[in-house]
Amino acid sequence: MSTRLITLINIAVLARILGTDDFGLVAAGLAVLALLEAVSEGGVGAAVVWRRQDPEKTAAVAMTISIIGAVLIGGAAFFAAPLVAEMFFDHRSVDIIRALSVCLILSGPSSVFVGILQRDLAFRKRVIPEILKAFTKTVVGVALALSGFGAWSLVYGHIAGMVIGLVALWWLSGWSPRLSLDRETVSSILPFGIQMTLVTILSVLSKNADYMLVGHFLDVATLGIYVLAFSLTDQIILGISWAASQALFPAYGAIQADLPALRRSYEDSLTAIAALTLPAAAGLAIVAEPLVQVLYGEKWSQVIPVVQVLAIYAMVHSVAFNLGDLFKATGRPWVLTWTNVLALMCAPAVAVVSTRWGIIGFAVGQIGLMAGFSIVRLVIADRLVGIGPKIFLRALRWPLLSTLVMAGATIGVDKFVHIEGALPRLIALIAVGCISYVIVLSITAPSLLFAVAAFTRLKRQPLLSP
């Protein structure tokens, strides 16, 4: 939560200094960088978690592969930047893409250190580098933005944050890096690493395809609006799913052979995730107007309806997100590969139709795309692991009911009680939402409140049934 709060403050401050073009241009570079990181790392972070024997040699081989990949892919990105910019964004993003390609040298080793911490279930240590990274990005980015660096303040802030994050990960992992290309280890982790690379590439493409499509079909300024709207849903809602994924992938892997235990664990964790994300998403849609006014200022009023639609998208995405951890932990990452391929094939067609109604239409199209493929993955999970609609709906029933009551109470107060000022209105609506939700949940499922509290601390055994 500390990392998310710092990032949210960073975006809020920068939004008052910078313009839509600045956010759009940097979003273009970061979308390309995310894809390049997935290719260059070669799935080595996940391989470190997955391969339990000879962890020292595994980490050394993983580090070597990640560095080689970073150099090769980073060089290719530098020279291909004009082509990428022309296809998806505009010519001003060329230099930004090239500058961010330097980050590949930092992200490769970072993925190995992250894998070591995940393998050891050191989740508290894992949080520290993220906090330091977010704090550094904020300090550097805001200082440079105030000095007139424009979009480059975001670029330099990102690079500085990655440097600090790498140093912190190195120190906290307790591992002295070395390089190796031991044949036996390479042959052991390479097949799994290739599968995970494909999964990661497709996942990154799925996550960033919306940025590329908005940049291609609309324009960079509209992309800046979309980025600010999506940042709110990402920091407030999707970050919960991401944090859960860091804990659940290794935890599911430890019990992958015991299917009844795995099903119980998935149901427990989904219930706790939904108990956080469903009310957060509904609440974000309700308070979008005063929240954007308080955080970004009046000049960003165009962001409000986009936030409201994307909050619904985040709700759908969050409750289906951790199916991916289940497939990976049971050795079936191919499910993610092929469903992501199909989603990516459908995305341009959806964008062609939905962008006729501008950025709002595009956001609605994303909801339909996400909902459709979430259902497909649930059907596959039912056939492979026995996690079907019954378990899914049972896990969601009380969080969903409590969320509906909370939404009704909050909308009622907002409609019939006039509150002057964006900040007092925001505080009042959040208070009503939180109180009503806790009251209903304490009546319908009191034990779930303790599970949610345990989940937010992300302890070593996160919400898994014995």
Image: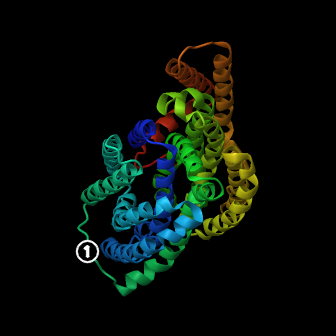
Q: Residue at x 68, y 38 (%)?
A: 397
Please identify the quadrant where the N terminus is shown: top left
420, 1: nearer the viewer? 420
Q: Residue at x 63, y 12 (%)?
A: 417
354, 215: nearer the viewer? 215
Image spot of residue 289 (x, y percent): 59, 29
Q: Quadrant of residue 214?
A: bottom right
Q: Is residue 377 above or below residue 401?
A: below
Q: What is the count of numbered marks?
A: 1
Q: Residue at x 40, y 70 (%)?
A: 52
Left or right: residue 142 versus residue 281 is left
Image spot of residue 243 (x, y percent): 47, 49
For the question of whether residue 388 can be seen, the reply is no
Tell me the SS state at disc 1. Answer: loop
For the question of whether residue 137 can be seen, the reply is yes
Left or right: residue 141 versus residue 316 is left
Q: Quadrant of residue 302?
A: top right
Q: Residue at x 57, y 50 (%)?
A: 223
Image spot of residue 74 (x, y percent): 40, 72
75, 20: nearer the viewer? 20
The residue singled out by tag 1 in the image is: 178
Image spot of residue 106 (x, y percent): 33, 64
Left or right: residue 366 versus residue 230 is right
Amino acid at pointer 1: Arg
Q: Quadrant of residue 213?
A: bottom right
230, 27: nearer the viewer? 27
Within 10 Å of the Cα at label 1, are there few (<14), some (14-19), or many (20+) other Cα atoms?
few
